[in-house]
Image: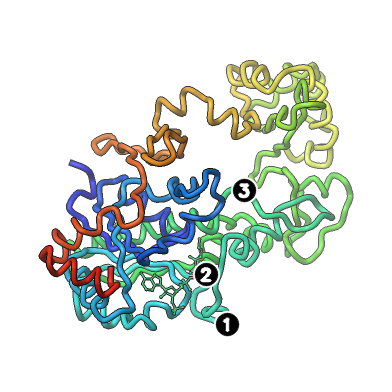
Amino acid sequence: MKALAGVKILDFTHVQSGPTCTQLLAWFGADVIKVERPGVGDATRGQLRDIPDVDSLYFTMLNHNKRSVTLNSKSDKGKEILTKMIEECDVMVENFAPGALDRMGFPWETIQEINPRMIYASIKGFGPGPFEDCKVYENVAQCAGGAASTTGMLGGVPIVTGAQIGDSGTGLHLALGIVTALYHREQSGRGQRVSTAMQDGVLNLCRVKLRDQQRLEHGPLEEYSQFGEGIPFGEATPRAGNDSGGGQPGRILKCKGWETDPDAFTYFITQAAVWKNICDVIGKPEWKEDENFSTPPARLPHLNEVFGAIEDWTMTKTKFEVMEICNPLNIPVGPILSMKEISEEPSLRETGTVVEVDHPERGSYLSVGCPIKLSDSPVEVERSPLLGEHTDEILKQVVGLSDDEIAEAKEAGAV
Ligand code: COA
């Protein structure tokens, strides 16, 4: 039995943030019923298409293991059907623009009245406050959550990251909130409202930068490259390039072939515990006893020199050779892997982290599988549903409509 078997989820999510959450819950075994507007569906079905008239990879990669029902929840018949679905489901998830569900006639108070055991989970861009009514997409959240101002090179423009920390990151946060509320319901018998804001989710992932903001009041941030370069700090946590955000200095360094291969780089961490191994491997054994280099505080003003010497060595090796040499010496390093390399990596296929999925309209494609592995609840990734593929079966099984009633609802444009 899957961990969340028996949990019914009314999935009103769209685009990326909400669908990330409900896809995870579906992977853990919940029955996720994705509600979509008749004839339209989730906007991402048609966005960034690589094959004409076929659900985009954007959509398929976020909606595995779900069933799709079409429903116009603004029509009278649609509202009637939705009310029945709220009665029958355990969790309702949505990430509409602020106020959309209220305008539809289903504020939290109404949902709770219809089904007091319902857990109502939502994602918005901002929490209560001056921006609570704003629509928000990924990069807005990265900017408003503190990630962009602290990402990029010193003196350069703020940079957004390719990791979708605003959308997928907040979806992950919401999934945790939902299973926590389900656990609580076991004892209380009541559902509750679970809210996450993308700004909050991004900030949660950027906590080390808020840490540094406060450390700045007590002096310069000595592990930042700019300290060794004699560049004064301003009032806010600066952009730190590829400096490590932790107590062990690290940088991205060139490897053999970097002149032509944009990903021939390694991340190299000068962990204090293995400093002597680093000195030996890069051919600087004298630094083991040199008072300018032998201790972590002594090295901080000389990090450019340290990483310059390490890079002289890494440039003579491929990024994988650096890994092979350093790992047995306990030196933490990591190759910069391209998406091409990741998509071809056999070990990621074996663990189900990258999966090949078959789709009736697009054929086979690669997707990211479940990154969380449960020993008793293995995940089988199933293709995303076509628009309204399960409308009839859901209206029968969940809502209890007869064939005639379904035909009537279709006639009225409600489904
Ligand atoms: N039946 C009837 N109407 C439906 C429907 C259905 N099944 N599904 C959606 N709608 C309606 C909504 O009620 C809304 O109507 P309203 O504007 O009259 O209230 C309308 O469709 C559009 O919904 P909305 O959420 O405003 O979509 P949008 O495309 O304008 O905005 C976002 C998209 C993502 C910007 C916005 O939803 C948002 O800010 N969401 C919260 C933050 C978030 O998750 N952002 C990240 C997305 S990856």
Residue that lies at the very extreme toward the front in this rendered image: 411
Q: Residue at x 25, y 54 (%)?
A: 390
Front tag of 1 and 2? 2
Q: Quadrant of the N terminus?
A: top left
Quarter of the rendering occupied by the C terminus: bottom left
Please state the horizontal and vertical placement of residue 125, each as a whole percent of the image.
52, 69
Residue type at numbered disc 1: Pro
Q: Tag 3's secondary structure? A: loop
Query: Which residue is labeled 1 in the image?
Result: 130
Is ligand 1 within 8 Å of the beta carbon of the residue shown at mark 2? yes
* 182 in relation to 53, above or below: below
Q: Are marks 1 and 3 in contact (CB under 8 Å)?
A: no
Residue 162, numbered circle: 3
Closer to the camera in the image, 204 or 106: 106
Amino acid carrying label 2: it is: Gly
Residue 290: x and y in percent read 82, 26
Q: Which mark is residue 217?
A: none
Quadrant in the picture for residue 341:
top right
Counting from the top left corner in percent of width and height, residue 33 is at 28, 58
The structure residue drawn at horizontal position 59% and vertical position 34%, both measured from the top left corner, is 339
Is label 1 or label 3 in front?
3
Residue sitting farthest toward the right: 230
Q: Which residue is mark 2?
A: 125
State how far apart marks 3 and 2 are (Cα): 19 Å
Q: Secondary structure at mark 2?
A: loop
Q: Residue at x 55, y 44 (%)?
A: 50
Tell me if 172 is positioned left or right of 65 in this view: right
Q: Secondary structure at mark 1?
A: loop
Q: Is residue 3 above or below residue 317?
A: below
